[in-house]
Amino acid sequence: MTAAMVENDQPSEGQPWGYLLQTWRELDVPEGWRAEIDEGQIVLVPPPHAHHNGIAAKVQRSLYGNLPEELEIYQTLGVHVAPLDKLYVPDLVVMPSELIAAADPEFSDPMDASEALLIVEITSKGNAREDRTKKYRAYARAGVPIYLLIDRFDTRGAMATLFTEPNEDGTYKHSDPVPFGKPLTLPEPFGTTLRTADFPV
């Protein structure tokens, strides 16, 4: 399934960030769906395939093996890409737990993407292009130090790619693509190796 746009009575182009954020806060999103802000519009993303969730669970289990105590893994955390006024809900985000504890208890505001140590996106058939291009550029612009893209629909075959050292121009200096079946090592502070052979295709 592909994403759906939320209709509103305001022009969709150039929406003020405050208006979009307030609308995002008040949305009654169906269970399992996610609401994101991209290109001045609110986009509803449908629940992913079971294999998608299976990969997320395996990555999370692997990360917990060596995760420092002050860090935590979040599955439905909205992150704000401030340089582009975008709001995404990645499949997994690793962030200091003290930042979550300090969040405003009354408003479900997104966290600043620049505070994330790792963001993981797992492609679905309908959104693979966005994860490879828009989100790749957005996370680099936000300064996310490690972006892990797990792409079951890569034209080269199922692939996990680790992007590191973000540039302000929206690119990463280094990429480490690994086909499913080969191990992928994540740098410190994670110090773990993902067994991609265990990922469902």
Image (tube, helix red, strand yellow):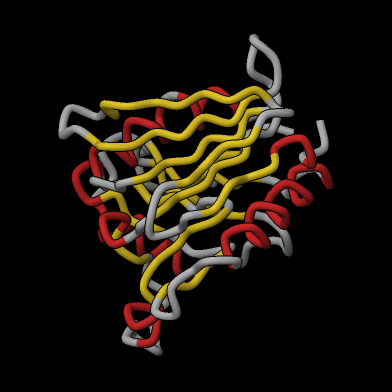
Q: Quadrant of residue 147?
A: top left
Point 38% across, 60% down: residue: 189
Point 28% across, 62% down: residue: 115
Q: Quadrant of residue 136?
A: top left
Q: Residue furthest top?
A: 156
Point 49% across, 68% down: residue: 67
Q: Residue furthest left?
A: 168
- Along the line of sight, the residue nearer the viewer: 173 or 10: 173
> Please, is residue 46 above or below residue 70 in the view?
above
Q: Quadrant of residue 65?
A: bottom right
- Give the quarter of the figure containing the N terminus: top right
**Residue 8 visible to an observer of this rendering:** no
Left or right side of 3 for 47: right
Left or right side of 110 for 84: left
Q: Residue 132: x, y in percent? A: 48, 25
Q: Residue 140: x, y in percent? A: 28, 37
Point 67% across, 29% down: residue: 182
- Give the quarter of the figure containing the C terminus: top right
Left or right side of 9 for 76: right
- Along the line of sight, the residue nearer the viewer: 13 or 32: 32
- Marks counted in the figure total 0
Q: Residue 80: x, y in percent? A: 33, 55
